């Protein structure tokens, strides 16, 4: 009989593995997690007192170790001491938190004796009278204060004021100046004949009534003004009476042109005047492209017939034009005379500043580089001897010997229409619709902006020997400034003469006299106004309103 074979039992490796889905595995993991933490769910983790004590100790050492040596302030009144003692003897309820108890359990570590000297709390003037310093205070001030570092060491305390010096603290304080008041109004100029072509009064007055230029005689006996009526009038400085009327500039517009074309043509304004200090000459320029030289000593008599009834003959004495300087391609807007050399500079709408020899009428240089009208010129005895401002928003410093640009200042964002040089410093200021800026010569370094903004198109500026600057805008605003600090101490608006429009309040030219005690303004209402300081003003009645700026704005 054959033996029977016994079947072997299956091992674990031979058993089939039942597959489980991801959902089943996830539910199983969640159940095991719930079973593990169900006993203490919602309970806080127990705090390790030793670890918490080390944490609080490190924080106290890092943040408050510098205060450990300070002495507590003593109670000022005796009643306060008694109340404190009574409160200390009275048993109080244990209301401290766990953190407070933990802080109290940390042993205090007294600081080193060498660092206590500079960290003691000293009450200045306490017990020794007002305004006095105790001996402890002197010792603390004389010592060096040490502060802890993150690495556990100590370093000397240096205040931030010693690291970064604040610029506003160095801003110069403004000097007190008396306010200026108007004391005389002169009316003598007439509107241009072009104004009579239009039936719209606003256009007639606005374009044809301006007094555009003014200059003083070096002897301060008379001054001259140029207007849109093509005339130059000479006035007596003390009385304001008219001495002489000069005619010679002509107008360029034609009567048969349309109104739109007339508005773009050159109007017959006399835009620039200058009187020589070494020769008996006066120079004038206008929008008729002419630059003229008048002889102040050579007169001519002209006979005129007039009178409504009969025939009357009268004789008028006028100055004579002895030279004409030809070369500008368009209207001439500015004129300046060199203080030491016999040359004059003129700038116009042809974007060029031309240098002329007074006697020979020769054009010495044509300073080209601007891209728009040259509206202001400064002439100085030292380099740079010529400074020009233009409607292209730039100011250029010129080398008169070479006829080239030394520097171009691009700080302005609007057209530069006015320049003024200080008679006592080697500085000058430029005025535009965005701001007034002050520069240092000879390099043209930017110093600062004037502290206030006039918010008008500045047409003219002037500075006298006392450090008073004046600026006039096209809206009739007349502001007076302290030249050193750039602070405006007087802001006012001019008043138009009766019968004029409110839009005729513009100021187009101004100049101080030789002494600097009088100011002449030429305005759009055909008037000339004279200003002087108020003798009754005092620093108490008109205090200086000044706030030092926090920073210097470059633009």
Image: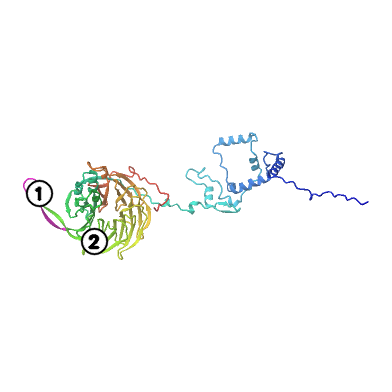
Local crowd size for mark 2, using a 10 Å CA cut-off: few (<14), some (14–19), many (≥20): some
Residue 383 in view:
no
Could you say which is closer to the camera, residue 145 or residue 482?
A: 482
Where residue 386 appears, as percent x and y from the top left, is: 30, 60
Where residue 110 appears, as percent x and y from the top left, is: 62, 48
Secondary structure of the residue carrying tag 2 is loop
* Residue located 56% across and 54% down the image: 155
What residue is disc 1 on? 306
Q: State whether the magenta stretch is mostly helix, strand or loop.
A: strand
313 in the magenta segment:
yes
Where residue 337 appears, as percent x and y from the top left, is: 25, 59
Q: Earlier in the sequence, mark 2 or mark 1?
A: 1
Magenta-drawn segment: 297-314
**Along the horizontal axis of the image, is 413 left or right of 253?**
right
Instruction: Quote the CA–CA distance across marks 2 and 1.
Output: 38 Å
Q: Residue furthest front?
A: 1
Residue 327's tag is: 2
């Amino acid at each position: 009989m054959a033996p029977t074979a016994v079947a072997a039992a299956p091992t674990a490796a031979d058993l089939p593995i039942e597959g489980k889905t991801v959902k089943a595995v996830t539910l199983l993991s969640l159940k095991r997690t719930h079973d593990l933490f169900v006993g203490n769910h919602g309970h806080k983790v127990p705090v390790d007192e030793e670890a918490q004590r080390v944490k609080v100790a490190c924080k106290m050492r890092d943040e408050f170790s510098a205060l450990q040596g300070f002495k507590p302030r003593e109670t000022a009144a005796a009643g306060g001491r008694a109340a404190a003692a009574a409160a200390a003897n009275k048993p109080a309820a244990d209301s401290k938190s766990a953190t407070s108890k933990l802080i109290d359990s940390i042993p205090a570590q007294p600081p080193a004796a060498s660092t206590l000297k500079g960290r003691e709390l000293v009450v200045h003037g306490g017990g020794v009278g007002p305004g006095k310093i105790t001996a402890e205070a002197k010792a603390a001030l004389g010592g060096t204060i040490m502060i802890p570092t993150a690495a556990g060491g100590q370093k000397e305390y240096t205040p931030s004021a010693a690291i970064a010096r604040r610029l506003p603290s160095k801003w110069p304080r403004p000097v007190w100046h008396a306010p200026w008041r108007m004391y005389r109004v002169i009316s003598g100029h007439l509107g241009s004949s072009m104004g009579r072509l239009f039936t719209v009064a606003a256009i007639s007055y606005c374009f044809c009534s301006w007094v555009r230029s003014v200059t003083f005689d070096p002897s301060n006996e008379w001054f001259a003004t140029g207007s849109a009526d093509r005339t130059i009038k000479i006035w007596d400085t003390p009385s304001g009476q008219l001495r002489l009327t000069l005619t010679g500039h002509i107008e360029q517009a034609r009567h048969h042109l349309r109104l739109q074309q007339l508005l773009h043509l050159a109007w017959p304004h006399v835009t620039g005047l200058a009187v020589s200090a070494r020769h008996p000459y006066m120079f004038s320029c206008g929008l008729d492209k002419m630059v003229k030289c008048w002889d102040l000593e050579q007169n001519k008599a002209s006979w005129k017939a007039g009178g409504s009834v009969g025939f009357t003959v009268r004789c008028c004495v006028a100055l004579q034009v002895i030279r004409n300087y030809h070369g500008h391609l368009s209207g001439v807007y500015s004129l300046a005379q060199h203080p030491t050399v016999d040359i004059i500079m003129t700038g116009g709408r042809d974007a060029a500043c031309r240098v002329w020899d007074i006697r020979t009428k020769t054009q010495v240089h044509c300073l080209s580089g601007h891209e728009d009208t040259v509206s202001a010129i400064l002439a100085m005895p030292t380099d740079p001897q010529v400074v020009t401002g233009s409607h292209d928003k730039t100011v250029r410093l010129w080398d008169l010997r070479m006829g080239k640009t030394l520097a171009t200042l691009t700080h302005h964002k609007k057209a530069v229409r006015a320049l003024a040089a200080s008679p006592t410093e080697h500085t000058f200021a430029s005025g535009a619709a965005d701001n007034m800026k002050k520069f240092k010569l000879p390099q043209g370094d930017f110093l600062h902006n004037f502290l206030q903004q006039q918010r008008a198109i500045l047409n003219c500026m002037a500075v006298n020997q006392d450090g008073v600057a004046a600026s006039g805008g096209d809206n009739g605003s007349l502001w007076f400034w302290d030249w050193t600090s750039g602070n405006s101490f007087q802001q006012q608006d001019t008043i138009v003469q009766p019968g004029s429009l409110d839009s005729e309040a513009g100021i187009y030219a101004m100049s101080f006299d030789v002494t600097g005690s009088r100011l002449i303004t030429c305005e759009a209402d055909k008037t000339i106004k004279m200003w002087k300081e108020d003798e009754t003003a005092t620093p108490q009645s008109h205090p200086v309103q000044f706030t030092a700026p926090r920073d210097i704005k470059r633009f």
